[in-house]
Image (cartoon, rainbow, N blue to C red):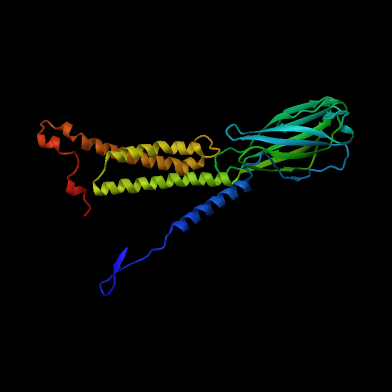
Amino acid sequence: MTTPDASGKTFLRKRRNAAPWILGIALLLLAVYYVMVVASGILDTSTDVPIAGENDTQREDYLTLQMRVQDVDLTNRVLLANILPIPHGDLVGDKAGEMSESVRIEVSSGGVTSTVVAYPGESIVDPTAVSLLLDRGDSTYPFDRPFADFQLNVQNDETGRSVPFVVEMSNSARPWVLTASVGAAAAEAGGQVYPVTIDGHRDALSVTLVAFYVLVILITTLMAVVIIGGAILRRNLEFANVIWLSATMLSFPALRAAMPGAPPIGTALDFIVLFPCIALIAVMLVWTGGYLLWRESSILRRRELDDDALARPAGPPVWESLPE
Protein backbone atom coordinates (compact mmCIF):
# COMPACT_ATOMS: atom_id res chain seq x y z
CA MET A 1 0.00 0.00 0.00
CA THR A 2 1.40 3.43 -1.00
CA THR A 3 0.95 6.56 1.13
CA PRO A 4 1.97 10.14 0.12
CA ASP A 5 4.24 12.04 2.51
CA ALA A 6 4.39 15.82 3.14
CA SER A 7 6.44 16.43 -0.03
CA GLY A 8 3.95 14.62 -2.19
CA LYS A 9 6.15 11.60 -2.75
CA THR A 10 4.72 8.17 -2.19
CA PHE A 11 6.34 5.45 -0.18
CA LEU A 12 5.47 1.82 0.48
CA ARG A 13 4.01 1.17 3.93
CA LYS A 14 4.66 -2.31 5.25
CA ARG A 15 2.13 -4.21 7.32
CA ARG A 16 2.97 -6.99 9.72
CA ASN A 17 2.04 -10.44 8.42
CA ALA A 18 -0.53 -11.99 10.75
CA ALA A 19 -0.26 -15.48 9.21
CA PRO A 20 2.38 -16.75 11.71
CA TRP A 21 0.18 -15.63 14.62
CA ILE A 22 -2.86 -17.34 13.15
CA LEU A 23 -0.88 -20.53 12.62
CA GLY A 24 0.53 -20.36 16.15
CA ILE A 25 -2.92 -19.92 17.69
CA ALA A 26 -4.26 -22.86 15.67
CA LEU A 27 -1.37 -25.08 16.81
CA LEU A 28 -1.89 -23.98 20.42
CA LEU A 29 -5.59 -24.87 20.28
CA LEU A 30 -4.76 -28.27 18.80
CA ALA A 31 -2.20 -28.88 21.55
CA VAL A 32 -4.75 -28.00 24.24
CA TYR A 33 -7.28 -30.32 22.62
CA TYR A 34 -4.87 -33.27 22.50
CA VAL A 35 -3.85 -32.67 26.10
CA MET A 36 -7.52 -32.82 27.09
CA VAL A 37 -7.98 -36.05 25.12
CA VAL A 38 -5.01 -37.70 26.83
CA ALA A 39 -5.94 -36.39 30.29
CA SER A 40 -9.55 -37.51 29.99
CA GLY A 41 -8.48 -41.13 29.41
CA ILE A 42 -10.99 -41.52 26.59
CA LEU A 43 -8.41 -43.51 24.59
CA ASP A 44 -8.00 -46.09 27.38
CA THR A 45 -9.97 -49.32 27.31
CA SER A 46 -10.78 -49.03 31.01
CA THR A 47 -9.67 -47.03 34.02
CA ASP A 48 -9.48 -47.91 37.70
CA VAL A 49 -12.21 -46.47 39.89
CA PRO A 50 -11.04 -45.16 43.27
CA ILE A 51 -12.95 -46.71 46.17
CA ALA A 52 -13.21 -44.97 49.53
CA GLY A 53 -14.56 -46.22 52.84
CA GLU A 54 -14.28 -49.56 54.59
CA ASN A 55 -12.96 -51.64 51.71
CA ASP A 56 -10.43 -53.80 53.52
CA THR A 57 -10.18 -57.08 55.42
CA GLN A 58 -7.71 -58.64 57.84
CA ARG A 59 -8.64 -62.19 56.93
CA GLU A 60 -6.43 -64.35 54.71
CA ASP A 61 -9.39 -66.27 53.31
CA TYR A 62 -11.40 -63.70 51.38
CA LEU A 63 -12.77 -62.80 47.97
CA THR A 64 -11.90 -59.94 45.68
CA LEU A 65 -14.99 -58.84 43.79
CA GLN A 66 -13.74 -57.37 40.53
CA MET A 67 -16.50 -55.15 39.21
CA ARG A 68 -16.27 -53.65 35.70
CA VAL A 69 -18.81 -51.01 34.73
CA GLN A 70 -19.83 -51.52 31.09
CA ASP A 71 -22.48 -48.86 30.48
CA VAL A 72 -24.34 -46.01 32.17
CA ASP A 73 -27.79 -45.81 30.56
CA LEU A 74 -29.48 -42.58 31.68
CA THR A 75 -32.49 -43.13 29.45
CA ASN A 76 -33.50 -46.34 31.21
CA ARG A 77 -31.73 -45.32 34.46
CA VAL A 78 -29.63 -48.45 34.82
CA LEU A 79 -25.95 -49.16 35.27
CA LEU A 80 -24.64 -52.35 33.66
CA ALA A 81 -21.61 -54.10 35.13
CA ASN A 82 -19.85 -57.47 35.38
CA ILE A 83 -18.75 -59.05 38.67
CA LEU A 84 -15.96 -61.62 38.88
CA PRO A 85 -15.00 -63.09 42.29
CA ILE A 86 -11.30 -63.90 42.82
CA PRO A 87 -10.62 -66.30 45.75
CA HIS A 88 -7.69 -66.00 48.14
CA GLY A 89 -6.30 -68.28 50.83
CA ASP A 90 -8.20 -71.48 51.47
CA LEU A 91 -10.92 -70.40 49.05
CA VAL A 92 -8.59 -71.08 46.10
CA GLY A 93 -9.36 -74.39 44.40
CA ASP A 94 -6.96 -76.99 43.06
CA LYS A 95 -7.29 -75.81 39.46
CA ALA A 96 -6.70 -72.38 37.97
CA GLY A 97 -9.77 -70.18 38.29
CA GLU A 98 -11.49 -72.66 40.63
CA MET A 99 -13.11 -71.94 44.01
CA SER A 100 -12.90 -74.51 46.77
CA GLU A 101 -16.16 -73.61 48.57
CA SER A 102 -19.70 -72.87 47.44
CA VAL A 103 -20.25 -69.12 47.54
CA ARG A 104 -23.44 -67.10 47.19
CA ILE A 105 -23.26 -63.42 46.12
CA GLU A 106 -26.33 -61.20 46.49
CA VAL A 107 -26.59 -57.76 44.90
CA SER A 108 -29.51 -55.63 46.13
CA SER A 109 -30.40 -52.49 44.18
CA GLY A 110 -33.45 -50.29 44.54
CA GLY A 111 -34.58 -52.00 47.73
CA VAL A 112 -34.88 -55.47 46.18
CA THR A 113 -32.43 -58.29 45.53
CA SER A 114 -31.75 -57.84 41.84
CA THR A 115 -29.02 -60.45 41.33
CA VAL A 116 -28.15 -63.69 43.13
CA VAL A 117 -25.09 -65.57 41.92
CA ALA A 118 -24.22 -69.01 43.29
CA TYR A 119 -20.82 -70.59 42.60
CA PRO A 120 -20.69 -74.29 43.47
CA GLY A 121 -17.58 -75.59 45.16
CA GLU A 122 -14.72 -76.78 42.94
CA SER A 123 -16.17 -74.94 39.93
CA ILE A 124 -14.61 -72.50 37.47
CA VAL A 125 -15.55 -68.92 38.28
CA ASP A 126 -16.98 -66.83 35.42
CA PRO A 127 -18.00 -63.14 35.39
CA THR A 128 -21.70 -62.41 35.92
CA ALA A 129 -23.65 -59.44 34.53
CA VAL A 130 -25.59 -57.28 36.98
CA SER A 131 -27.96 -54.37 36.47
CA LEU A 132 -28.07 -51.54 39.03
CA LEU A 133 -30.71 -48.83 39.27
CA LEU A 134 -29.59 -45.22 38.85
CA ASP A 135 -31.08 -42.65 41.23
CA ARG A 136 -30.75 -39.68 38.87
CA GLY A 137 -31.70 -39.10 35.25
CA ASP A 138 -30.37 -36.86 32.54
CA SER A 139 -32.27 -33.62 33.16
CA THR A 140 -29.09 -31.58 33.79
CA TYR A 141 -27.21 -32.71 30.66
CA PRO A 142 -24.24 -32.34 30.19
CA PHE A 143 -23.65 -31.85 33.94
CA ASP A 144 -25.27 -35.14 34.91
CA ARG A 145 -24.42 -36.60 38.31
CA PRO A 146 -25.93 -40.11 38.26
CA PHE A 147 -25.29 -42.42 41.20
CA ALA A 148 -26.25 -45.97 42.09
CA ASP A 149 -26.77 -47.24 45.65
CA PHE A 150 -26.67 -51.00 46.15
CA GLN A 151 -25.75 -53.61 48.73
CA LEU A 152 -23.37 -56.54 48.57
CA ASN A 153 -23.62 -59.72 50.61
CA VAL A 154 -21.27 -62.71 50.23
CA GLN A 155 -21.80 -65.90 52.23
CA ASN A 156 -20.96 -69.57 52.18
CA ASP A 157 -23.83 -71.27 50.38
CA GLU A 158 -23.53 -74.41 52.58
CA THR A 159 -22.89 -73.03 56.07
CA GLY A 160 -24.52 -69.60 55.67
CA ARG A 161 -21.59 -67.75 57.28
CA SER A 162 -20.41 -64.47 55.84
CA VAL A 163 -17.37 -64.48 53.58
CA PRO A 164 -15.12 -61.40 53.83
CA PHE A 165 -14.45 -59.57 50.58
CA VAL A 166 -12.96 -56.44 49.09
CA VAL A 167 -14.21 -54.59 46.02
CA GLU A 168 -12.08 -53.62 43.03
CA MET A 169 -13.74 -51.57 40.32
CA SER A 170 -12.85 -50.51 36.78
CA ASN A 171 -14.73 -48.30 34.35
CA SER A 172 -15.27 -49.10 30.66
CA ALA A 173 -18.24 -46.75 30.22
CA ARG A 174 -17.31 -43.64 28.30
CA PRO A 175 -17.48 -40.69 28.73
CA TRP A 176 -18.12 -41.20 32.44
CA VAL A 177 -15.73 -40.60 35.33
CA LEU A 178 -16.70 -42.78 38.28
CA THR A 179 -15.90 -42.91 41.98
CA ALA A 180 -17.14 -45.40 44.57
CA SER A 181 -17.39 -45.81 48.32
CA VAL A 182 -18.08 -48.76 50.63
CA GLY A 183 -19.92 -48.15 53.87
CA ALA A 184 -19.84 -49.95 57.21
CA ALA A 185 -21.29 -53.45 57.33
CA ALA A 186 -24.77 -53.97 58.72
CA ALA A 187 -25.79 -57.25 60.33
CA GLU A 188 -28.90 -58.74 58.75
CA ALA A 189 -30.55 -62.14 58.58
CA GLY A 190 -28.47 -63.06 55.54
CA GLY A 191 -25.18 -62.04 57.16
CA GLN A 192 -23.00 -58.95 56.78
CA VAL A 193 -24.36 -56.51 54.18
CA TYR A 194 -22.14 -53.74 52.82
CA PRO A 195 -23.65 -50.61 51.22
CA VAL A 196 -21.84 -49.44 48.08
CA THR A 197 -22.30 -46.18 46.18
CA ILE A 198 -21.11 -45.45 42.63
CA ASP A 199 -21.08 -41.78 41.66
CA GLY A 200 -20.35 -40.50 38.15
CA HIS A 201 -20.03 -37.41 36.01
CA ARG A 202 -19.08 -36.68 32.40
CA ASP A 203 -15.44 -36.02 31.59
CA ALA A 204 -14.15 -32.54 30.75
CA LEU A 205 -13.78 -33.33 27.04
CA SER A 206 -17.45 -34.24 26.63
CA VAL A 207 -18.60 -31.12 28.49
CA THR A 208 -16.31 -28.98 26.31
CA LEU A 209 -17.67 -30.50 23.10
CA VAL A 210 -21.26 -29.95 24.25
CA ALA A 211 -20.40 -26.33 25.08
CA PHE A 212 -18.98 -25.94 21.55
CA TYR A 213 -22.20 -27.23 19.98
CA VAL A 214 -24.25 -24.88 22.15
CA LEU A 215 -22.03 -21.96 21.12
CA VAL A 216 -22.53 -22.86 17.45
CA ILE A 217 -26.32 -22.84 17.89
CA LEU A 218 -26.27 -19.48 19.67
CA ILE A 219 -23.91 -17.82 17.17
CA THR A 220 -25.93 -19.13 14.21
CA THR A 221 -29.13 -17.74 15.73
CA LEU A 222 -27.52 -14.34 16.30
CA MET A 223 -26.21 -14.36 12.72
CA ALA A 224 -29.73 -15.05 11.46
CA VAL A 225 -31.13 -12.15 13.47
CA VAL A 226 -28.46 -9.77 12.17
CA ILE A 227 -28.73 -10.86 8.54
CA ILE A 228 -32.52 -10.89 8.39
CA GLY A 229 -32.77 -7.66 10.37
CA GLY A 230 -30.30 -5.96 8.03
CA ALA A 231 -32.17 -7.22 4.96
CA ILE A 232 -35.45 -5.87 6.35
CA LEU A 233 -33.96 -2.45 7.02
CA ARG A 234 -32.46 -2.35 3.52
CA ARG A 235 -35.68 -3.72 1.99
CA ASN A 236 -33.57 -6.34 0.28
CA LEU A 237 -35.09 -9.63 1.34
CA GLU A 238 -34.38 -12.44 -1.10
CA PHE A 239 -35.47 -16.04 -1.52
CA ALA A 240 -31.97 -17.11 -0.44
CA ASN A 241 -32.82 -15.82 3.05
CA VAL A 242 -35.72 -18.26 3.27
CA ILE A 243 -33.55 -21.17 2.16
CA TRP A 244 -30.86 -20.26 4.70
CA LEU A 245 -33.39 -19.99 7.54
CA SER A 246 -34.96 -23.32 6.59
CA ALA A 247 -31.59 -25.08 6.55
CA THR A 248 -30.66 -23.48 9.88
CA MET A 249 -33.85 -24.59 11.61
CA LEU A 250 -33.47 -28.16 10.32
CA SER A 251 -29.80 -28.33 11.31
CA PHE A 252 -30.36 -27.49 14.99
CA PRO A 253 -31.96 -30.87 15.88
CA ALA A 254 -29.13 -32.60 13.97
CA LEU A 255 -26.54 -30.69 16.01
CA ARG A 256 -28.44 -31.60 19.16
CA ALA A 257 -28.37 -35.30 18.25
CA ALA A 258 -24.63 -35.13 17.42
CA MET A 259 -23.68 -34.01 20.93
CA PRO A 260 -21.70 -36.69 22.83
CA GLY A 261 -24.04 -38.84 24.87
CA ALA A 262 -27.06 -36.76 23.88
CA PRO A 263 -30.17 -37.95 25.77
CA PRO A 264 -33.73 -37.71 24.41
CA ILE A 265 -35.35 -34.29 23.99
CA GLY A 266 -36.55 -32.70 27.23
CA THR A 267 -33.44 -31.76 29.22
CA ALA A 268 -32.68 -28.36 30.73
CA LEU A 269 -30.37 -27.64 27.79
CA ASP A 270 -33.31 -27.94 25.40
CA PHE A 271 -35.51 -25.51 27.32
CA ILE A 272 -32.71 -22.97 27.86
CA VAL A 273 -30.96 -23.05 24.44
CA LEU A 274 -32.45 -25.30 21.76
CA PHE A 275 -36.17 -24.50 21.92
CA PRO A 276 -35.80 -20.66 22.08
CA CYS A 277 -33.33 -20.67 19.17
CA ILE A 278 -35.55 -22.88 17.01
CA ALA A 279 -38.59 -20.74 17.86
CA LEU A 280 -36.75 -17.55 16.94
CA ILE A 281 -35.56 -19.00 13.62
CA ALA A 282 -39.07 -20.30 12.91
CA VAL A 283 -40.64 -16.88 13.53
CA MET A 284 -38.17 -15.21 11.15
CA LEU A 285 -38.74 -17.96 8.58
CA VAL A 286 -42.53 -17.58 8.67
CA TRP A 287 -42.36 -13.79 8.50
CA THR A 288 -39.77 -13.75 5.70
CA GLY A 289 -41.56 -16.46 3.75
CA GLY A 290 -44.91 -14.74 4.09
CA TYR A 291 -43.47 -11.40 3.03
CA LEU A 292 -41.76 -12.85 -0.05
CA LEU A 293 -44.85 -14.87 -0.94
CA TRP A 294 -47.02 -11.75 -0.82
CA ARG A 295 -44.47 -9.70 -2.75
CA GLU A 296 -43.79 -12.23 -5.49
CA SER A 297 -47.46 -13.08 -5.92
CA SER A 298 -48.48 -9.48 -6.54
CA ILE A 299 -48.48 -10.00 -10.30
CA LEU A 300 -50.85 -12.96 -9.94
CA ARG A 301 -53.32 -10.87 -7.94
CA ARG A 302 -53.77 -8.26 -10.66
CA ARG A 303 -56.80 -8.25 -12.91
CA GLU A 304 -54.92 -6.64 -15.76
CA LEU A 305 -51.34 -7.11 -16.90
CA ASP A 306 -49.11 -4.91 -18.99
CA ASP A 307 -45.88 -5.71 -20.71
CA ASP A 308 -43.86 -3.38 -18.49
CA ALA A 309 -45.06 -5.14 -15.33
CA LEU A 310 -44.09 -8.52 -16.77
CA ALA A 311 -40.67 -7.33 -17.86
CA ARG A 312 -39.88 -5.50 -14.64
CA PRO A 313 -38.70 -7.76 -11.76
CA ALA A 314 -40.93 -7.95 -8.73
CA GLY A 315 -39.90 -6.20 -5.56
CA PRO A 316 -39.19 -2.67 -4.42
CA PRO A 317 -37.63 -0.15 -6.81
CA VAL A 318 -33.89 -0.26 -7.24
CA TRP A 319 -33.31 3.03 -5.43
CA GLU A 320 -35.07 1.67 -2.30
CA SER A 321 -32.52 -1.14 -2.13
CA LEU A 322 -29.53 1.18 -2.17
CA PRO A 323 -28.05 2.27 1.17
CA GLU A 324 -28.51 5.90 2.05
Let me know if residue 188 appears in the view. no
Residue drawn at x 64%, y 34% as measured from the top left = 71
Residue drawn at x 29%, y 72% as measured from the top left = 5
Q: In this orientation, which residue lies closer to the viewer: 61 or 269?
A: 61
Classify 11 as above or below 104. below
Q: In this orientation, which residue lies closer to the viewer: 96 or 202?
A: 96
Return the residue found at the far bottom: 7
Q: Determine whether, in the image, residue 318 is placed left or right of residue 53.
A: left
Residue drawn at x 46%, y 55% as measured from the top left = 22
Image-quadrant location for residue 19: bottom left
Quadrant assignment for the C terminus: bottom left
Residue drawn at x 52%, y 44% as measured from the top left = 210
Image coords of residue 230 (percent x, y): 29, 49
Image-quadrant location for residue 109: top right
Image-quadrant location for residue 238: top left
Q: Determine whether, in the image, residue 148 is placed left or right of residue 289.
A: right
